[in-house]
Amino acid sequence: MLGPVILAASRSDRIRRLISAAPVTRQVVDRFIPGATVDEIVPIVRELTDRGLELTMDVVGEDITTPEQAGAARDAYLELVDRLKQLELGTRAELSVKLSMFGQALPGGHELALANVRPVVEAAAAIGTTVTLDAEDHTTLDSMFAIHEELRKDFPQTGCVIQAYLFRTEADARRLAGNGSRVRLVKGAYKEPAEVAHQSKHEIDKAYVRILKVLVEGEGYPMIGSHDPRLISIAQELAHRAGRKLDEYEFQMLYGIRGDEHLRLAAEGHRMRVYTAYGTDWYGYFMRRLAEKPANLRFFARSILTR
Ligand code: FAD
């Protein structure tokens, strides 16, 4: 029950101000967002890739209110690409972007987000890597999928995310499961109404498996974004039954969650990509992590109280 309350709170400006100003130790935020600047994140990139993991990098920040902020978000990604170029990791370090951060919710936002994301996709391609468009709340998805389609005309490797909790997703998966596509399937992290999304964990998990089947039996490259041990073993089984080799799909998990499992899957020969977020505007990302596991809230509250 606490999860939806935390997600609702994450949309409140008052609570944002309160939490952002709370004496949160860097240690608490660091568990999920292990750096504030590109200089701080580069050693983490080195450490994780040295351990056999792959990465998808996210610069946090989504609730921007001006085109200038959207431009600054684009520049932050371009700075990141510049640093990744020196590390020569190719697709071992790709990028994840939220179009809201590139201006999607502003007036004329669809065009603005496309104009801001395109140079990032171009820069990523120039260093031999790719970009995946994250899925945000359901009202943004038609625009996200249209931008994805547009980008794929020049950069067919551009990926996107689909969310198992939405009723629409099975049809989206069928549309997206063609040759050359890269699709990350996740359960979904936003507070969505019952008109558009499953509400119970059981229904969401069942939908996840149905959609997973569509992806692994399709011709694209499935990216399985989950920490759920049951879904991970189902995914392994379905991929095996579909005749996929270990490099024909990958697992993805978030930095700071089930780290031992990242290493275990990598050691078994799986491609294991860690979604690694950094930056100073951590509020929305952090609140979604609290909502996914309300026990995290105790950890967070204790850190404030014991200061
Ligand atoms: P759950 O049933 O929630 O969790 C399974 C187990 O994992 C839990 O029992 C717990 O042990 C552990 N766990 C899960 N979450 C946490 C946590 N926050 N803290 C501590 N332990 C935890 N959602 C979107 O809506 N759009 C996106 O673009 C998107 N991108 C994602 C990218 C990646 C790589 C991943 C892994 C997730 C992404 N998500 C995204 C979030 C996703 O929708 C879920 O909210 C999140 O993954 C939790 O679901 P789960 O599949 O891990 O299963």
Image (cartoon, grey):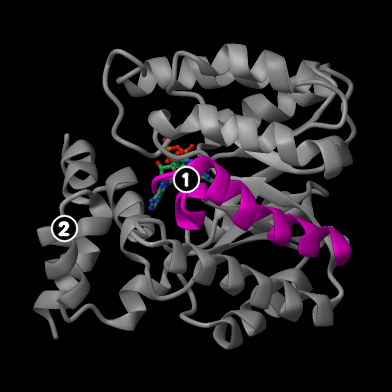
Of helix, strand and loop, which one carries label 1? helix
Residue 124 image offset from top left, x and y in percent: 78, 61
CA gap between label 1 and label 2 equals: 21 Å
Query: Does residue 203 lie above or below 82 as drawn?
Result: above
Magenta residues (range): 99-127
Most foreground residue, 225 or 120: 120
Most foreground residue, 226 or 236: 226
205 within the magenta span:
no
Q: Does ligand 1 reach within 8 Å of label 2's beta carbon?
A: no
Check disc 1 and give the amino acid type: Gly
Residue 84 image offset from top left, x and y in percent: 76, 75
Residue visible at 18% across and 42% down? 8
Looking at the image, is mark 1 or mark 2 earlier in the sequence? 2
Residue visible at 54% across and 50% down? 112
Mark 1, other Cα within 10 Å: few <14 / some 14–19 / many ≥20: some
Residue visible at 79% across and 46% down? 270
Residue located beneath label 1 in the image = 109
Residue visible at 63% across and 53% down? 115
Direction from residue 3 to residue 167 in the image, left or right:
right
Quadrant of the frame with the N terminus: top left
Query: Does residue 289 lie above or below 17 as drawn?
Result: above
Query: Does residue 264 lie above or below 48 as drawn?
Result: above
Residue located beneath label 2 in the image = 13
